[in-house]
Image (cartoon, helix red, strand yellow):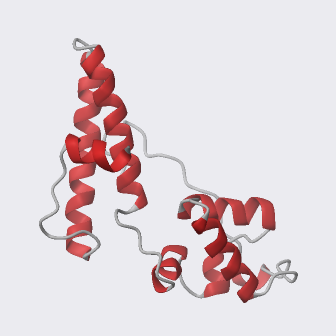
Amino acid sequence: MVHRHNRGRGKSGSIKPNKKTVSWIGEYNKEEIEKLIIDLYKKGVPPSQIGLILRDQYGIPFVKYILGKKLTKFLEEKGFKQQIPEDLLNLMKRAVRVYEHLQKHKKDKVAKRALMLIESKIMRLVNYYKEKGKLPKDWKYSIETAKLLVK
């Protein structure tokens, strides 16, 4: 997402390995990697963490090169569709934490502004996911629904 609410341009991420240099994955074949992904997802590990676990513990740098599709697309094809996209859910968790903080500390102006910024990001993501068809057209964000989904 664009760094809309800060002064910097952000830092670029790490460089992904070249397709031709991914030769150290010889000990795992495609079926074993698919089984690893499904097992991790069934344990409750979110897709972003699955990628990190595969990279750090199993030496699999980039799942898309092996499976031919992204991790979330692979999970959807196997019948593990997420109800709400992970990035939207993480933003809603942050919004709930800041909202609960504001219930205790009513005069915290910085937290009020932070909540406004988080909720504007949520609204933009909701509109995007409605256009893409990942959320129903009548889905509405409110802090009450966020509390129910997060807890």
Which residue occupies 62% across, 75% down? Answer: 38
Which residue occupies 47% across, 80% down? Answer: 73
- Residue 62 in percent (x, y) is at 66, 73
**In the rendered view of the protein, which quadrant contains the C terminus?**
top left
Relative height, residue 7 to residue 20 (above, below): above
Direction from residue 146 to residue 90 in the image, left or right:
right
Which residue occupies 64% across, 66% down? Answer: 40
Relative height, residue 76 to residue 135 (above, below): below
> Which of the two residues, 79 or 16, is positioned nearer the viewer here?
79
Q: Quadrant of residue 85?
A: bottom left
- Residue 14 in percent (x, y) is at 64, 58
- Residue 101 in percent (x, y) is at 33, 22
Direction from residue 54 to residue 98 in the image, left or right:
left
> Which of the two residues, 47 or 119, is positioned nearer the viewer here?
47
Q: Quadrant of residue 126?
A: bottom left
Q: Quadrant of residue 53?
A: bottom right
Q: Is residue 1 visible?
A: no
